[in-house]
């Protein structure tokens, strides 16, 4: 008898599951709730990763020090520069993807225009 009761309860739960799922999705539609887009779900924010002001700071702090220290990709002529530049690059995040060359090319173009 216990096995029969378990089977009936199990069948009832299986039958009720689609109704619960559709009720939940109906509530989401009714309140305008939906899953966030992929980028928003991962980052939690929308917008530019490295705005112009932040990139200007990156260039002032990182690029000029790299140039003064004679840094290559990962090695600098002065030991303290490697660590200093590396820590600042981590702080600036996405700005390092733009690189120092972009700002220098823009500066050169501005100088030629004057």
Image (tube, rainbow, N blue to C red):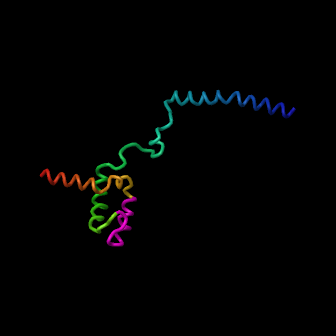
Q: Is 16 situated left or right of 108 in this image?
A: right
Q: Residue furthest right?
A: 1
Q: Give the image location of residue 23, x and y in percent.
A: 60, 28
| Near-viewer residue (45 or 73) | 73
Q: Residue at x 35, y 71 (%)?
A: 80
Q: Main secondary structure of the magenta part?
A: helix
Q: Which residues are magenta?
A: 73-90
Give the image location of residue 105, x and y in percent: 23, 53
- In the rendered image, which quarter is residue 45 located in? top left
Q: Is 110 colored magenta in this rendering?
A: no
In this rendering, the count of numbered labels is 0
- Residue depicted at x 85% and y 34%: 2
Q: Which of the two residues, 85 or 105, is positioned nearer the viewer here? A: 105
The quadrant in which the N terminus is found is top right
Q: Quadrant of residue 83?
A: bottom left
Residue extending farthest left: 114
């Amino acid at each position: 008898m216990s096995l029969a009761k378990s089977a009936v309860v199990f069948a009832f739960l299986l039958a009720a599951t689609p109704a619960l799922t559709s009720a939940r999705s109906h509530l989401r539609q009714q309140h305008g709730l939906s899953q966030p887009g992929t980028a928003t779900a991962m980052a939690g924010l929308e917008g530019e990763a490295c705005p112009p002001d932040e990139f200007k700071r990156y260039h002032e702090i990182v690029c000029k020090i790299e140039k003064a220290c004679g840094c290559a990709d990962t090695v600098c002529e002065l030991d303290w520069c490697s660590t200093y530049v590396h820590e600042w690059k981590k702080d600036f995040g996405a700005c390092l993807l733009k690189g120092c060359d972009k700002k220098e090319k823009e500066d050169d173009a501005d100088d030629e225009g004057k």
